[in-house]
Image: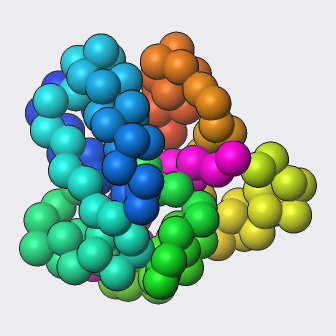
């Protein structure tokens, strides 16, 4: 599965500045079709209305965390195969293991740059 400029990407973060940063990095990488959600429940609602090629979600959000969102997506017959990258400020091993067990495709620790984001997206797409 390859990603291209037309791939719809959903960025999920309750911190508007982080959404802007990720959106700008994605734009630098050539992705134009970027939507946003401020928490997991809003993201799920958007995912049920529109097909996304990739989800990039923060871990720490209220009321629904990125981890809870990931588990919901993986449990949903319609959404379960959607590629999912988790973004977090903490690189705690138990978080990484929990996310992997829940079916995350990749993991990015803040702060990160366009190259790191591209490498993670390429790895998820199987083009690295």
Q: Nearer the viewer, residue 94 or 53?
A: 94
Image coordinates of residue 2 in percent, x first then y, are 32, 32
- Residue 46 position (above or below residue 124): below
- Location of the C terminus (image quadrant): top right
- Tell me where residue 51 sits by quadrant: bottom left
Q: Which residues are magenta?
A: 78-89
Query: Tag count in the figure?
Result: 0
Does residue 62 belong to the magenta stretch?
A: no
Image coordinates of residue 95 in percent, x first then y, are 78, 62
x 64%, y 37%: residue: 110
Image coordinates of residue 70 in percent, x first then y, are 51, 71
x 14%, y 38%: residue: 33
Q: Is residue 65 visible?
A: yes
- Location of the N terminus (image quadrant): top left
Q: Nearer the viewer, residue 53 or 63?
A: 63
x 50%, y 27%: residue: 117
């Amino acid at each position: 599965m390859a990603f291209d400029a037309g791939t719809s990407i959903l960025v999920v973060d309750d911190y508007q500045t982080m959404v802007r940063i990720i959106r700008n990095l994605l734009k630098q990488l050539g992705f134009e079709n970027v939507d946003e959600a401020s928490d997991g429940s809003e993201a799920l609602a958007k995912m049920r209305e529109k097909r996304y090629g990739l989800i990039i979600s923060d871990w720490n959000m209220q009321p629904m965390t990125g981890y809870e969102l990931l588990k919901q997506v993986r449990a949903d017959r319609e959404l379960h195969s959607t590629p999912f990258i988790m973004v977090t400020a903490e690189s705690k091993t138990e978080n990484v293991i929990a996310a992997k067990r829940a079916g995350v495709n990749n993991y990015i620790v803040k702060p990160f740059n366009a190259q790191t984001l591209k490498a993670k997206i390429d790895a998820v797409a199987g083009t690295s």
